Amino acid sequence: MDQPADRVSVYSFTGIYEQESFWRDASLADAPSFYDLTGLSGTSGYLSDDTLPLLTEKIPSCAGLHFIDSGNTHYMSKLFTDRIDTPFALVLFDHHPDMQRPAFGDLLSCGSWLRAALTENPFLKEAWLLGVDPALAREVLEEDRIVWQDHGAVIPGLRHCLFSGRELYLLPEAGCLPELLPSLREAGTALFSAGLPLYLSVDKDVLSPDDVTTTWDQGTLSCSALYAAIEALLEACPLLGADICGECAPADGAAAIAQNDAINTKLLDIYRKHR
C-alpha cells in the first residue's frame, strides 16, 4: 500500500526523537509513523547487508516527510529514492557532498549514498548540492577525474559537472536560491525548466553551529536562509518526498535537543503548508 503523500514518519536510531516533541503534535491529521530502530545493529555510519532488508521493509514509498535521525543514517535517503519510478531531481542541503567511494566493499554509508544513487538509479536525472563546501565537493570527485565547470557568468556561484551521465550542480551559497530562481529558469536548467519533481533531503549540518548542534562539522547557512530556500523550492516544483537528518546526540544536552526540536517543528510546518 502506498504511503499517503502527507504522511510523516520518524525513524529513531539513537533514541533522540523520544526527547523531542515536534512529531507529537496533536493537530496532525494522522499520527506519524514511529519506528524504534535503536536495537538494530549495523546502522551507524554504514548500513550492514544483514540490516538493509530490515530497513527496506519499513519504507512503503518515498512519499511524505521522513525524519531519519543523525547524519550517520543519511543513507536512508538512498532507500527512499530507490522507491521512485519516475524521472526526478534530488536536491540536497548538506555541508558534505556524500559522494565518497565506499570504504568497505559495497557497503552503503552516510558518506557514499548519493554516489550510489547517481550510479544505480536510472530515474535520478540530476542532483543539486546546496550549501555543500566547495573544497569537499572538489576533493571527493578528484579520483574520478571530474572537474567542476564554473557557471558563475550565468548564475553567480553555480558549478556543474556530469557524474555517471547525470547532471550534477553545486550551489555553495544556498541562501541565495530564492533570488536565483528566475535566472535558473532563464538559463534552462532541467530542474526549473522541465518541471522535474523533487526529492528533497536536508542534513542540518548545513547550518551554522550558532543555530544548531549536530554530530558532524558544519556549514554557515542560517536557519532563516534554509527556510526561505526550501519555501522557494516547494513553491516552484512538485515534491515527491523529503527527509530530514542531522540530529544532535542524546548526550548533547537539553539546549542542543531543544534547538533541533524547534528546527524540526519549523521544517514540518513548511512541509505541511505546501502539501
Image: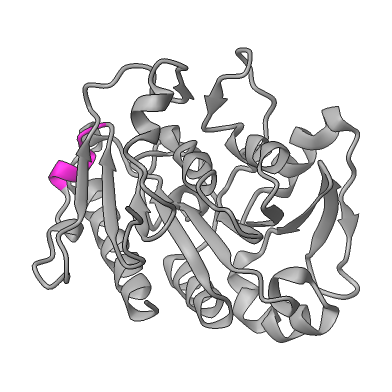
In this rendering, the answer to whether 206 lies above or below 135 is below
Q: Residue at x 30, y 59 (%)?
A: 264
**Image quadrant containing the C terminus:** bottom left
Q: 228 or 30, which lies in front?
A: 30
Tell me if I can see residue 209 in this picture: no
Q: Position of residue 79 (x, y in %)?
A: 48, 40
Tell me if I can see residue 100 in this picture: yes
Q: Residue at x 51, y 59 (%)?
A: 200
Q: Position of residue 144 (x, y in %)?
A: 85, 31
Q: Residue at x 65, y 34 (%)?
A: 116
Q: Position of residue 168 (x, y in %)?
A: 76, 53
Q: Is residue 83 magenta?
A: no
Examine the residues drawn in magenta and state their main secondary structure: helix
Please report the bounds of the magenta region as a residue range.
14-19
Residue lying farthest to the left in this orientation:
26
The colour scheme is one colour
Q: Quadrant of residue 98?
A: top right
Q: Residue at x 55, y 26 (%)?
A: 108
Q: Would you say 268 lies left or right of 257 here? A: right
